[in-house]
Image (tube, rainbow, N blue to C red):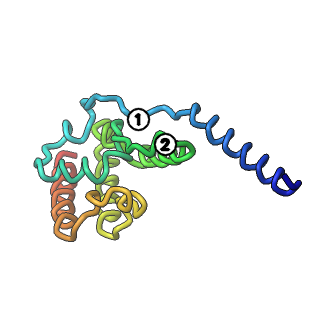
Amino acid sequence: MRPIKKIIFAILSIILILFITIQFIQPVRNTSGQVLQTDISNTYKIPPDISALIKNSCYDCHSNNTVYPWYSNIQPVGWLLEADIKNGKDKLNFSEFGSLSSRRQISKLRNIENRITDGTMPLPVYRLMHPSAGLTDEEKQFLSDWIQNTRDSIALKR
């Protein structure tokens, strides 16, 4: 082998060994398997069709129960997914929604409505990998109406 081929072979071998090695460093999974008492579905009456939309389009990143795709087992993709999930839960966690103050719940609901309406949620990369998570204009309006009604009912209780 010529020296340049030996160098390329050595570099590729090192990359392959590193890739195989990092497969053993798996992130902690976001799967509690429980629906907490503070989950939004236990806090507010949610019609089944609204609940299905929220679970399909939001729960993977915004709850304590993520349904992981097969490619989440491949690193570094799994690490990136876990970072996105952690970030999503830090901003909004439907599993703990009931533990927020009514003022904070109203604020979160307003933010959800804005994000859905302007199309920034679900994230475009999530919609790319999960086409069924995309929301039609009709579904966005349906969610928006439910959010407004829920916000109004929270405000009346205060």
* Residue lying at 48% horizontally and 47% vertically, measured from the top left: 81
Q: Residues within 10 Å of mark 2 (few under 14, many from 20)?
A: many
Residue 105 or residue 50, whichever sits in front: 50
Amino acid tagged 2 = Glu
Q: Nearer the viewer, residue 87 or 110?
A: 87
Name which residue type carries label 1: Asn
Kindly indicate whether the residue at mark 1 contacts the one at mark 2 (C-beta within 8 angstroms): yes
The reply, left or right, for residue 29 in relation to residue 5 is left
On screen, residue 117 versus residue 23, left or right, reads left
Is the residue 55 above or below the residue 121 in the image?
above
Picture coordinates of residue 69 (x, y %)?
Answer: 38, 45
Query: What is the distance, in whole Å, between disc 2 and disc 1 at their CAs?
Result: 8 Å
Indicate the secondary structure of the residue bearing disc 1: loop
Taking the spot 33% from the left edge, 65% from the top edge, the residue there is: 114
Q: Residue at x 16, y 69 (%)?
A: 138
**Residue carrying label 2:** 82
Q: Position of residue 4 (x, y in %)?
A: 85, 57
Residue tagged by mark 1?
Answer: 30
- Residue at 38% in and 62% down: 128
Q: Earlier in the sequence, mark 2 or mark 1?
A: 1
Q: Position of residue 13 (x, y in %)?
A: 72, 44
Closer-to-camera residue (99/117)? 117
